[in-house]
Amino acid sequence: MNTEQELADVKKIIENAGYYWVHQSREEFEATKADPKMIDKLFKHAAYERIQQWLELADERLEGKSHEVYICPGNDDWWEVDDMISCMKIVKPCDNLVVDIDGHEMVSCSRSNPTPWDTPREESEEDLAVHLDELCKRVSNYESAIFNFHVPPHGYSLDLCPKLDKDMKMSAEEKIHAGSQGASRSSRNTSLCSASTAISMSLAVAQKAGRTLMINPGSEYSEGILKGVIIMLDKKKVKDYVFTQG
């Protein structure tokens, strides 16, 4: 880089895109490259630091406002993230909890069925089904409940993703269903709304299963684009929804 401003500009681009980086000398770089444990340590440190910055920014921007913000991690997130969320003033944790959202019970789960990437919050399909069943038993009114499960239900448009070959390369044509059978059984035809985000390769999609509206806002995290969905609820129905990105 020729100037400090150019370096600052590149840093800003990388941070906005969601990547993590560190300054190192050539010697430090070579030593790190040869030590997988050091790479993992640096990655986690940078990730925790970025998460903390976003949480503090949310608390700062929301202070004094009437908004309620609940955060549920995903299967890729380390368990330490829960402790970070619980330390915030305005932003609140909701994983494994039933919380009130304007008269609607929202039950959340960060876990997933097994994936090819061996992520921190995976468990067997059988154990996940038991966990989801136990969570759902804490809901008193299924007709107006919101199921905020990170893993999507199996067999719907929400859980379609490219098939991987033995070298972990994605197929350009063939897709498979990668969601959870347990989530499918828990969500189908019971709740008012079911939202999931685990299948990041899935496009933004909404689908009905009986009376339940199931939504996956999709993701383009590699491009630095955050996708979401605004859901407008009535007492016993979903009035409307709008997909967002920014």
Image (cartoon, rainbow, N blue to C red):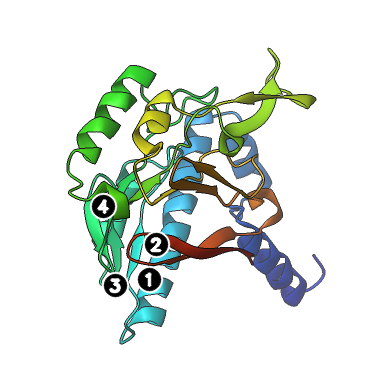
Tell me the tag on residue 90: 3
Residue tagged 1: 56
Residue tagged 4: 83
Residue type indicated by callout 1: Glu
Task: Pick the quarter of the image with the N terminus.
Answer: bottom right
Question: 38 and 137: which one is in front?
Answer: 137
Residue tagged 2: 52
Q: Position of residue 70 (x, y in %)?
A: 33, 61
Q: Quote the CA–CA distance across marks 3 and 2.
A: 13 Å
Please rate how many residues cluster around mark 3, counting C-alpha atoms within 10 Å: few if below 14, some from 14 to 19, many from 20.
many
Q: Circle 4 — which element? A: helix
- Asked if marks 1 and 4 touch (Cβ < 8 Å), the reply is no
Q: Circle 2 — which element? A: helix
Q: Quote the CA–CA distance across marks 3 and 1.
A: 9 Å
Report how many numbered discs are placed on residues in the image: 4
Is residue 112 visible to us here? no
Residue type indicated by callout 4: Asp
Sooner in the amino-acid sequence: mark 3 or mark 1:
1
Question: 52 and 94: which one is in front?
Answer: 94
Sooner in the amino-acid sequence: mark 4 or mark 2:
2
Sooner in the amino-acid sequence: mark 4 or mark 3:
4
Q: Tell me if 106 is positioned left or right of 27 in this view.
A: left
Sooner in the amino-acid sequence: mark 3 or mark 2:
2
